[in-house]
Amino acid sequence: MSYSTRARITRKGLLVFTARRGHKGNPAALEAGRQKRALGGPSTWSDTSRRKVARIAQAWVYGRTSQAGDVWDEKSADCAARRFVLLTVTLSAKQMHTDQDVKRLMLMPFLRQLKAKHRIANYLWFAEKQPGTGNIHFHIILDRFLPVQSAQALWNAQQNNAGYIAAYRAGREAWHAGGFRYDEADARSLAVQSAAYREGVRTNWSNPAASTDIKPVDGAEAVMRYVTEYCTKGAKSDAGGVQHEVYGQLWNCNRGLSKLDPFEVEMTPELDTVIKAETDAGTLRKIDGERWAYYAGDAGRVLSDALPWLHQAFRAHWREQSMKLPSRRSLRRAGRKTEPRLSIASRKREGPTQSGGAGQGAAQENGPRKASH
């Protein structure tokens, strides 16, 4: 088996490492992982998984930046990253299914609905346990704006199918059996709890607002901070010291994101000379590992000034990778192709009542059109 020294380059640093050509991973470690999954034990984050998730998230931001402007430009990266949002979905009642079943019966259909109804094709999700309840919940990074009301309706529909809305309704009706009752354990104010009670009564407790939360991601660095935070969290413990661990997958993404490749080049004497000179000058700070060395600093500017060919190769690589990510225009085209269209003659034959009903049904299903953000 042959070895080669490669450099993986980003705007904020570069990683120099020794790679084994044709290496498919440690067979013993792979077999141990398969046995652990077969036994159904709790999942833990490995260093390999953390590196893979970080690589996917970084490639995602760079790919979107290439669609928005110059991938080497930090302002373009921040502009592209502001399209990202963090969506959190939780269970509104005590968890009744295994972690694997919640993902299979609720999370995956929810993600399919996001793509079908809102043309959201790219996602990166993380599973966690809530310290107080032990319920599983999910943090999902998306690269397209989504109204919180839309996400809430879709997630609560999955909760309803799995029986959680019925359990939530029974709990709320029992708590408010004699009318509105203030909950001191709830962090919300009296006014907020009162408004939530009135809304719950109006909707028959069928659309809990606390099940979903959306907040924007401010800048490219924030995306990586979120990813690092979720990858480094351990098992959750409640007040009694009981640990709650996630079973099954801790994270996943759509297939398109997993196909994105980082920018790597073979180490050359020219590149090695530039790296050593900038390290000696203090521009880059070296961190040594067993079979790798990471150089932190403004690697993008340094290398683009010293090696213009590397700058051009970096931009070309991410332009190519960005083609793997569906654009909003392509998703709109795909949506139009799947929608049935009727000719004018067909509409006349069907009559005004039938065509009007179909239009109303489509409006109710898809909701009002909103401007893209």
Image (cartoon, grey):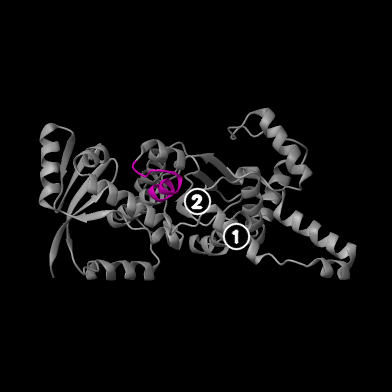
CA neighbours of label 2 inside 10 A, class few (<14), some (14 to 19), many (20+): many
Instruction: Locate the C terminus by quadrant.
Output: top right
Q: Secondary structure at mark 2?
A: strand
Q: Inspect the image, locate mark 1, and give the three-letter code of the amino acid beneath it.
A: Arg
Q: Inspect the image, locate mark 2, and give the three-letter code of the amino acid beneath it.
A: Phe
**Label annotation for residue 333:** 1
CA neighbours of label 1 inside 10 A, class few (<14), some (14 to 19), many (20+): few
Q: Position of residue 104 (x, y in %)?
A: 53, 64
Left or right position of 330 against 226: right
- Front residue of 199 and 271: 271
**Label annotation for residue 37:** none
Left or right position of 32 against 152: left
Task: Specify the segment rendered in magenta.
Answer: 61-72
Q: Position of residue 123 (x, y in %)?
A: 48, 54
Q: Secondary structure at mark 1?
A: helix
- Front residue of 86 and 179: 86
**Label annotation for residue 138:** 2
Q: Position of residue 126 (x, y in %)?
A: 44, 52
